[in-house]
Amino acid sequence: MIRIRLVAADGSVREVPATDGARLLDVAQAAGAPLEGTCNGDMACATCHVVVDPADFARLPPASAEEEDLLDLVPDARATSRLACQIVLGAGLDGLTVRIPA
């Protein structure tokens, strides 16, 4: 079991379980996080934007050029911003902390 820490816009933190191979978007939505994921992971929107904790960012594989292009459209994107639909969880990401922007 993989543990993911979701930090809400109000600063509250919730730890949720995930299975190996699950997408962060699906895990966060199942936990009630307000991520739309309008395009269902087809990288046609950026409604699943999350900010990865800087301490965890290097554990993720690099974003694709398409993901980077979509993140350029996000008004509050940060250096550690990612699309939750593009993060596939595995044992190496146990304890990953992500902030859900307002």
Image (cartoon, rainbow, N blue to C red):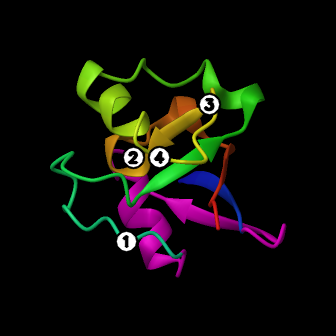
Q: Are marks 1 and 2 in contact (CB under 8 Å)?
A: no
Tell whether position 15 is magenta.
yes
- In the picture of the structure, the residue carrying the numbered disc 3 is 80
Residue in view at x 36 percent, y 64 percent? 26
Q: Could you tell whether 36 is left or right of 100 in the image?
A: left
Q: CA distance from mark 3 to mark 2?
A: 22 Å
Q: Are marks 3 and 2 in contact (CB under 8 Å)?
A: no
**Which residue is farthest right?**
11
**Residue 38 coordinates in the image, percent (x, y):** 25, 68
- Asked where in the image residue 3 lies, by quadrant, the reply is bottom right
Q: Which quadrant holds residue 55? A: top right
Of pointers 3 and 2, the one earlier in the residue sequence: 2
Task: Answer with mark 1 or mark 4, whichever residue precedes in sequence.
Answer: 1
x%, y% of residue 67? 31, 32
In magenta, the rendered stretch is 9-33
Residue type pointed to by label 4: Val
Mark 3 or mark 2, whichever is nearer to me: 3
Q: CA distance from mark 1 to mark 2?
A: 22 Å
Q: Which residue is mark 2?
A: 20
Instruction: Provide the residue designation for mark 4.
Output: 74
Precedes in sequence: disc 4 or disc 3: 4
Kindly identify the residue that appears in the image at 54 percent across and 48 percent down.
75
